[in-house]
Amino acid sequence: MSAFGKKMISILGVAWAAMLSGCNVEDLSALRLLPPFLANAPSSVHMESGLTYAEHDGQSLLFDLYRPVITDEPTPLVVVVFGGGWRSGSRDQLMEFAYDLAAHGYAAAAIDYRLADGTSKFPDQVIDVLAAVEFLRENADRFGVDPARVGLFGASAGAHLSLLAGMAEDLSVFDTRFASGQDAGINVIVNLFGPTDLTIESSPETERQIQAVENFLGSPLDQARALRHLASPIEYVRADGPAVFTVHGRADMLVPVSQARNLIDAMATAGQEHTYIEIPGMGHTIAAIWISFEAQSYRAAMFEFLAEHL
């Protein structure tokens, strides 16, 4: 079965289960709001799957492109980056968001990237995000996108990669192909509960986080102090950086809410444009499930932010 079909069955299953559990239909967003791929596709959104944006060691890096069908002008572009602790996941994880973005007039490119699975490590994943942006800009006419209006949308590890790729003012620290002092020219970033500071010392209770970061960096934390700074988005806060829309849960046990709060404080001090929504009681990942109450609670504000900055 295709990823599209699996997603459809999964979300309809959530709605059906909620009905069986006795939820009030009028209080259930899953039933009030159709998933984007049911509400908007195929009449208003066109999707192309399995396009290649780069190759590494014989591995094709793919993306799916979601575009509004009716448009007379090049559309702003949003590159969508999934999460999974940097070592798992795929480009269809944020499919509903990509459809929703396209339904709102954006071209959404949901990308795969090299996973930190033992054969790849930081900064390969950041380089891949940048390569996707570069490829889509170079092929702007082919895909009908505006190369001057580009945003990044990421969840968890994908948000972390988006922040690094979009906020760094000198991309040569990640990839020497870029000229010293060159940035990615990103207008806006949507940061859904992404890690922002890998330099903070972890407590013994956070072994899962330690293992994920060490795997990502390819080195034990006590031997990777320079890398930890290089891989921390908070190090790249700047007044002239892209506008950042951040959502984080107060009950997130995987990426502590302090990671978002510290980033927001740093951006406020530097004068970098930002909006922050903190959701009480929310743990990790639920805000990246389009049909969830949490995602619907910030959805309108996110689109207002995108419209303002893209």
Image (cartoon, grey):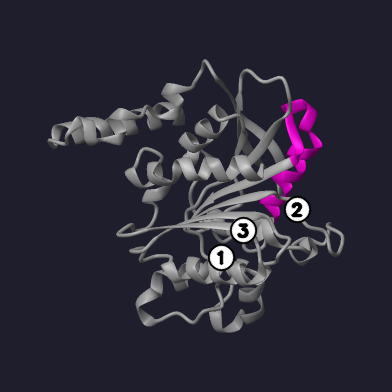
Element on which disc 3 rests: helix
Q: Quarter-wise, where is residue 63 in the image? A: top right
Q: Amino acid at mark 1?
A: Phe
Which residue in the rendered view is the most extreme toward the left? 22
Q: Which mark is residue 163?
A: 3
Q: In this rendered view, identify the residue nearer to me: 3 or 13.
A: 13
1 or 2: mark nearer the eye: 2
What is the CA distance from the residue labelled 1 to the residue labelled 2? Answer: 22 Å
* Residue bearing the label numbered 2: 184
Q: Amino acid at mark 2?
A: Ala
Q: Residues within 10 Å of mark 3 (few under 14, many from 20)?
A: many
Q: Quarter-wise, where is residue 263 in the image? A: bottom right
| Residue 58 visible in the shown view | no
On screen, residue 268 versus residue 279, left or right, reads right
Q: Are marks 1 and 2 in contact (CB under 8 Å)?
A: no
Q: Which residues are magenta?
A: 127-148
- Residue 112 belongs to the span the image colors magenta: no
Nearest to N terminus: mark 1 or mark 2: 2
* Residue bearing the label numbered 1: 216
The residue sitting at 80% across, 63% down in the picture is 172
Nearest to N terminus: mark 2 or mark 3: 3
Q: Residues within 10 Å of mark 1 (few under 14, many from 20)?
A: many
From the image, which quarter does the N terminus lie in? top left
Which residue in the rendered view is the most extreme toward the right? 179
